[in-house]
Amino acid sequence: MNINNTSQLILKKKNIFLKKKILFSGNIQDSLPEILKTKLSYIHLQKYNFLKYFSKTNKKNIFIECLVNKDILKHCNTVIYFFSKNKKETFFQIKNIISLLKKKEKIFLVGENKSGIHSFVKYFKKEIFFKKFTYGKKCTIYVHIIHKKISFQLKKFYKIHYWKKVPIIFLPGMFGYKKLDLGSKFLISTFYKNKLYNKKILDVGSGSGFLSIAILKIMKKNKITVSESCLTSMKCCKKTFQLNNLHAYFKISDIYSSIKGKFDLIISNPPMHNHLKRSVEFTKEIIYKSLFYLKKKGELRLISNKSYSYEKDFTKTFYKFNILKENNFFKIYQGFKK
């Protein structure tokens, strides 16, 4: 397993952490928590797909939760948090952690310089003061020592957007948190033609559940399975369905990892980035593995930014393929199983 630059920087300072009881949290991108031998190590994963970095023997020390809670922290006195490029998500999660730590306990914030970690520290310094601890490998580690208790109220972080008077719930870090995504709206516009009834539909990487909610509002008599790896997104997705008095099956899944059965239609608005890098891996896996989860004559309908091209992938995978709709920004691909 490759160790990225942020983890290499932590390993250079490993003597500081060896006798600590550490909780690892945030945007964990490798197996450092298993490599760094501390007095005690626990791992908080907010994204189910991060499990791939860890061996099966270590899973008793892994907590897969939306947020850190008292039970996770009760055995720890130090936190190492890996910064993500999303500042509001980082603040949301770190404020929650700090509200649970005791006086004189420490939280270390580590991230690549190009990720925006320095501007994050400056922007939120009035609420949480981080001091530069060390730097190298084009990364920086900051530290915050708990001096006083701060409060954390989850309800203050919720945001609601409306689509055709239908409320969609968000938390920081979720796709569409600032405003409802134009790509999702464009994909939804294709649901009005050739309406499906009494069909099994899978929404891969569902995020807030916006696509699935729209399907059920347009085509009510369908069975929807919502698949998502991010626990924050899944929490909001469930709340949105409950608020709109709609039903779905919810699966915490790394793409298809927890999915069973076959579907008439698979839909997806996949992410274009993996942390700081543009990536097509997620989309390609959705395309190539979809055949295992589609019924005979089943359809994959997927939207992509126009700067990416998946024509070859659809041609290789499907019996029949076409571009259903496009504009200046997006393409909607449609592939059919034989």
Image: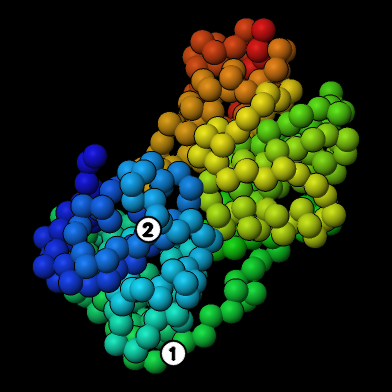
Residue 43 seen in render: yes
Q: According to the image, label 1 marks what residue?
A: 149
Task: Please say if 262 is above or below 318.
Answer: below
Instruction: Residue 159: give x, y in percent of width and height.
Output: 66, 66
Residue sitting at 53 percent across and 51 percent down?
Answer: 230
Q: Is the residue 197 above or below the residue 249 in the image? A: above
Q: Left of 111 or right of it: where is 9?
A: left
Specify few, some or many for label 2: CA neighbours under 10 Å numbering under 14, 14-19, or 20 or more: few
Quadrant hosting residue 132: bottom left
Position of residue 250 measured from the top left corner of the image (x, y, whole percent): 67, 45
Q: Is residue 108 above or below residue 323?
A: below
**CA separation, marks 2 and 1?**
27 Å
In this picture, is 41 found above or below 21?
above
Residue 246, x across and y down, in percent: 83, 49
Q: Nearer the viewer, residue 34 or 137?
A: 34
Residue at 67% x, 26% y: name it.
Answer: 261
- The residue sitting at 27% across, 71% down in the picture is 21
Q: Residue 6 versus residue 200: which sits nearer the camera?
A: 200
Q: Residue at x 51, y 20 (%)?
A: 288
- List the residue tagged with mark 2: 61
